[in-house]
Amino acid sequence: MDINLFFLDFETTGLNPYLNDIIEIAIKKYNEEDYYETLVKPKKLPPGLVTYILPHITNINGITDRMIQEKAISKSESLYKLLEYIESHSDEASPIYIVSHNGTSFDFIFFRRLLSELINKRRFTKFKETIIERFNYIDSLLLAKRFLTEKVSQPNLCKKYGIVNEEEHRALGDINALEKLYICLCNSFSKKINKDEDYLIHHPEEVNQYLFV
């Protein structure tokens, strides 16, 4: 059975999802090798500065001003290609599930901001009814909190489950690790609720029901 399940991650100019901006996007569908990844040119420079990326952000993710200047594309183009990827990798009827770690407090806010800023442009009209209205959001951090007592940051959970992230704090590395982590979390919680191990992976429509009871 095909599952419209996608893993999404943003790298950003800072940790405030209401004030900072996206500088990298990566998304991939569950159980597929294909993915979409791009650097994104921020709309605004940090106040009082002539650079896009503050040094402490570069220290975290390795993304530099020069990389943005030479390789980044506009937010409009990045969103269009992101939505094209989702559309081309989804069937035409089923809900679309987008998974991020700490998405509720971070990635999903950035994503909704991006959609809000750009979706009324003419070229995006086709996506409104075909995919956007079918979006559902799953925060894997909340899933981990549902049954684990230790710290549930993505790096800590990857260590717990023996998952190696070859490019930590880069969007593609984080979604590849997140896919493996999400499978582990779903398998563990499925057993906890007395279901087959792979039950929640194949029933993403039920995940949020368990998170918000």
Image (cartoon, helix red, strand yellow):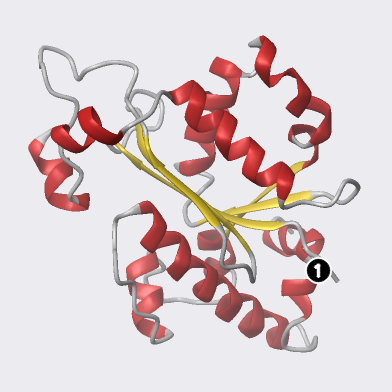
Residue at x-position 48% and y-position 57% = 101
Residue 49, image x, y percentages: 10, 16
Residue 90, image x, y percentages: 77, 51
Residue at x-position 75% and y-position 57% = 4
- Name the residue that disc number 1 marks: 203
Residue 184, image x, y percentages: 56, 81
Quadrant (top left, top right, bottom left, bottom right) of the N terminus: bottom right
Residue 13 visible: no
Along the line of sight, which residue is nearer the eye, 193 or 161?
A: 161
Along the line of sight, which residue is nearer the eye, 41 or 19?
A: 41
Return the residue found at the far front.
70
Compared to residue 4, the image places residue 122 above or below, namely: above
Along the line of sight, which residue is nearer the eye, 106 or 90?
A: 90
Q: In screen coordinates, is 114 left or right of 31?
A: left
Q: Badge 1 local density, few (<14 within 10 Å), some, or many (20+)?
A: few
* Total marks placed: 1
Residue at x-position 74% and y-position 28% = 127
Residue 74, image x, y percentages: 41, 23
Q: In screen coordinates, is 171 left or right of 128?
A: left
Q: In screen coordinates, is 127 left or right of 143?
A: right
Quadrant (top left, top right, bottom left, bottom right) of the C terminus: bottom right
**Tag 1, which secondary structure?**
loop
Residue 39 visible: yes
Q: Quadrant of residue 173?
A: bottom left
Q: Amino acid at mark 1?
A: His
Along the line of sight, which residue is nearer the eye, 135 or 145?
A: 135
Residue at x-position 50% and y-position 26% = 77
